[in-house]
Image: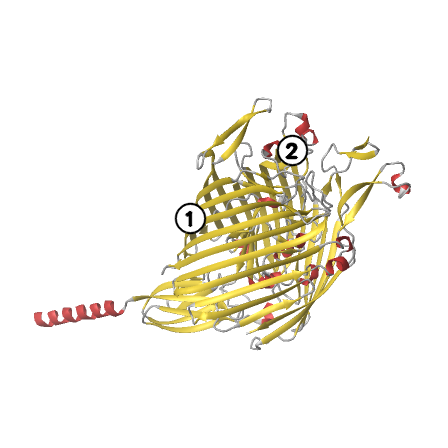
Amino acid sequence: MKSNLTTVLIGLFVLVSTSLLFAQDYVLTISVLDQESKEPLEGVSVLISPCECGGISNSSGIFSKRLPSGAYELSIEYLGYGTQQLQINLDKNQSVSVQMLVEEEQLSEVVLLAQKRNQNVETPQMGVLELNIRDLIKVPTALGEFDVLKSITLMAGVNSSGDVSNGVSIRGGSLDQNLMLYEGAPVFNPTHLFGLFSVFTPDVISGVDIYRANIPAKYGGRIASVLDIKVKNPYVDQLKIEGGIGLISNRLTLTMPLLKDKLMLIAGGRTGFSDVLFPLLIPRLKNTRANFLDSTVKLLYLLNPNNQLTYTNFLSNDFYQLDLISSIENINSSSNQYDFKTRNHTFKWLHTFENSSSLINRFVHSVYTPQNLFPEVNSENVIRFESQIQYSSLQSEYANTTQEALKYYAGLEVKRYQINPGTLDPGNGNSINPVALTTELGFESSAYVNLDWNPSPQLAFSGGLRLTQFSLLGPFDEAQYNADGLFEGITSFNDQEVVKNYRNPEPRLGLNYKLSENTSIKMSYARIFQYIQNIYNTNTPLPTSRWKISDRYITPQKNNTYGLGLYTNFFDSRLEFSAEGYYRKTANNLTYRPGADFFLSRFIENEITKAEGKSYGVELSLRKTVGKINGVMNYTWSRSLLKTDELRPINRINNNQWYASDFDRPHTFNATVNFEGDQYNSFSFNFVGQTGRPFTIANGVFEEQNVSIPIYLYRNNARLPTYHRLDFSWKIAYSKDPNRRFKGDWIFTVYNLYSRKNPYNVYYTQRNGTVDSDVFLESPLGAYELSILQGALVSLSYNFKFQ
């Protein structure tokens, strides 16, 4: 009996030991891609049976889970794509690549392709827009070019700074208050051809994320918004060629494997020459000469299933000439020439752990070099004014998304700013002396953490904290002033000596409470500081603007943003409605003093003043995301105001009273409507209407040597007429067969369909005799509206793909 018991116990021991030995856990890694673009898909649902477990893919399209050995069935689902079913026999660590095919009947109905239904209701993030390439290419733009910045101006709270201009104001903020990242690298001037195009190479873009409220803690350095523009990852196993031919520009993109399943490349470029077309399209630019180019090259190296290395290079170069619009004393020139370059480098290492957490390390180096050239009259000499920004950053971030109800990330970031404010080189001329302003050096160090927590099905919370320290280092010359603001002397700081330190906490909060399955309310708060600012006196970001980092007198800009919103969906999320209210309180906004000349100023604090700001508004948005007719309508009521607090009357703006900023637009309405005709034809209409931009009108006139000179006492004391415009595009596709190797389509675009002459500005000129006397009567000056577009811009472009 005892022997039998011993035998049984030994058998059980062997059985359990064998079971433990063979029930070993293995890691299953799923990489999910779009079959056509080879882009990773984030937020794809992975359902696993019989364990009844799973999760969603991360931002790199990767889902990873440790499972016991055995047979599993996987269901991979994503809105707008066909469901993929897989059977896996897990007896070792396995990596599986899944390519998902867009369901054409769903694609034709989706305008803003959601990662999942009710995402706008469930997430605690406010003021966020996530657009992919399919959203962006539907928007009609000037001369038929797909353009990121033109597309986002059709969203609530985003305004263009003028006609055919890519200077963007978001929720009343100035142009420099937007952080524009291109594959993680900042872009300091985002425009080609006076703002006609943005500089981002169109065919390599995978999408753009826009944050306007509780900006995630991973971002810092700008107080109004973040535009994070992403470049495609070249997940391909064969050559792919795509491009386009248009009136102004031509482009070509190659995507190819260099080492099978290891090293891939995407390289895109665009170039434009408009010397002939500009006088035909825009008569006022008849003396203009302009050309540009941009290129993006990205290398992807798959070291193993858990490690990816990427390198991205971006180049942008513009040259244009136009009649003299800015001048320097004692320079005799009849034209301005602008030559500005951007060169960005991004190195990124992504490591994915076995539990779906990840570590991202990124190094960025960016150089922006604008030049202002003045060819002297009756001479071959060219006088050059050049400035430069050199930016470098190193960032390391750990993210954990293993639990659906609790996600977090934490990181460190160091930024280095080196700014050359300007050097004036007279060449071989003798009319002016050379000038070299002192180079500025600053470091910004940050530590941040962000947590997304869903404590219950009804409640979602997002909280973040970013701690920043900014240091201005020598060599640096600092002016000293007495109590009356009069100059007393200069204090010089040695190399690497600390001139000024700033330390600031930046909390970010978001709260979402679901009133029902399809309705929620959200609240948000964010505080952000900005240590680099752009000083300009125009609404278009020309290279003549001047960048400046914070010092003792120019303190960091500060922003506190509060938000409250209601979100609700109807008809199974086919119709989405949102109402967002916001209030932004800002400090240390920079604006130029009356009569300022900061172009070559050694101590620029004498040319500018700091202003308190407030922006507030309500944004209403209605989206129809499915159906043959789909689109979005937005209405925004908002104000953007500034107020100085200067003691000396000569430095006050509007006598220290609140006044409208350059980006104050009380009423804005825009709409995009898409008509999906059949598989060969689709049509899109855009309409934009908004209150006219503020401008400054003369308060009087005085005579000086028989010349009438206007007197300006109050800034932005008038408005241009209401701006409105209708655009149209027609896309003609040969075939939507996903198996066809060559695909081509034509895009016919009419920008400003009914030829509205929207005034860009108002200027004054000395009247000649009795010209326009019925309007101006006895006034010695005449005021005239300047309209950039004199009619509709019609364009035709051809786009093609081969793979």
Left or right? Give the position of 337 relative to 503.
Answer: right
Please name whichever residue, 76 or 208, is drawn nearer the observer in this view of the structure: 208
Residue reaching furthest top?
483
Can you identify the residue that label 2 sits on? 643
Image x and y of residue 128, in percent: 56, 52
| The one of 699 and 157 positioned closer to us in this rendering | 699
Residue 79, quarter of picture: bottom right
On the rendered image, what quadrant is the N terminus found in? Answer: bottom left
Q: Amino acid at mark 1?
A: Gly
Residue at (39% x, 68% y) in the render: 95
Alpha-carbon span between mark 1 and mark 2: 37 Å
Note whether residue 84 is visible.
yes
Question: Circle 1 — which element?
Answer: strand
69 or 725: nearer the viewer: 725
Above/below status of 703 relative to 60: above
Left or right, 29 with respect to 138, comes to left
The label shown at residue 411 is 1
Task: Name the residue at 41% across, 65% down.
Answer: 302
The amino acid sitting under disc 2 is: Lys
Does residue 1 appear anywhere in the picture?
no
Q: Residue 560 at x, y = what percent?
A: 55, 39
Task: Name the residue rendered at 15%, 68% in the picture.
Answer: 9
Please report contact status of discs 1 and 2: CB closer than 8 Å, yes or no.
no
Q: Is residue 774 left or right of residue 202?
A: right
* Residue in view at x 66 percent, y 29 percent: 651
Quadrant where the image shows the C terminus = bottom right
Q: Quadrant of residue 601?
A: top right
- Whole-percent x, y for residue 234 in the image: 49, 66
Name the N-terminal-most of marks 1 and 2: 1
Mark 2 surroundings within 10 Å by alpha-carbon count, few (fewer than 14), some (14 through 19), many (20 or more): many
